Image: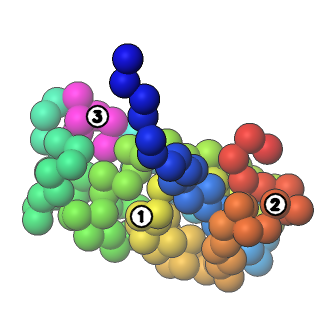
Amino acid sequence: MKIWYQHGSEHSANLVMIGHFENASDATKAKEIIDALTSQVAEDQTNGTLTLGSPSDRYGSAMLDLLGRLNVSIGPQEVEQFAYEVSVKIEGNDLVLTTEEIDISAFLKVMFLKGARIEVYSAHDYPDTAHGKDR
């Protein structure tokens, strides 16, 4: 019998990002953009134009077209962030995103470009908030 002598820990970020918008319409628009990009990334994975873990320095044609229509500037290496497991919800004028990932620059850009004042924190450090993993 082998006995394992190691230390374990929780490695998740339990990250919360809240975009505070002027109105609920702006928050909804940002969520729609995130949803559209998430759908396109899933489609790109299915058709083989995007491989997770192998960021490209180029966009697929469908992604490039979508980014142009949405008028959002996200780098080609950032688009795979929309394949990450995230929770995105609207709470009044706020868009609340929770994830265990630390790569969030694409989400940050969407909120910022759509006019949000953004708050980012670890729910591990602020467990008294109403956000974070398992909430």
Amino acid type for the residue under numbered disc 3:
Glu
Does 26 sit above or below residue 6?
A: below
Q: Is residue 9 left or right of residue 51?
A: right
Residue stretch in magenta:
41-46
Q: Quadrant of the C terminus?
A: top right
- Most distant residue in the top direction: 1
Q: Where residue 95 sits: x, y (%)?
A: 70, 61
Q: Is residue 105 in the magenta section? A: no
- Location of mark 2 (residue): 127
C-alpha separation, residue under disc 2 versus residue under disc 1: 21 Å
Of labels 1 and 3, earlier in sequence is 3
- Location of mark 1 (residue): 103
Of labels 2 and 3, earlier in sequence is 3
In the picture, the disc for residue 43 is 3
Does 70 sit above or below residue 84?
A: below
In the picture, the disc for residue 20 is none
Amino acid type for the residue under numbered disc 2:
Pro
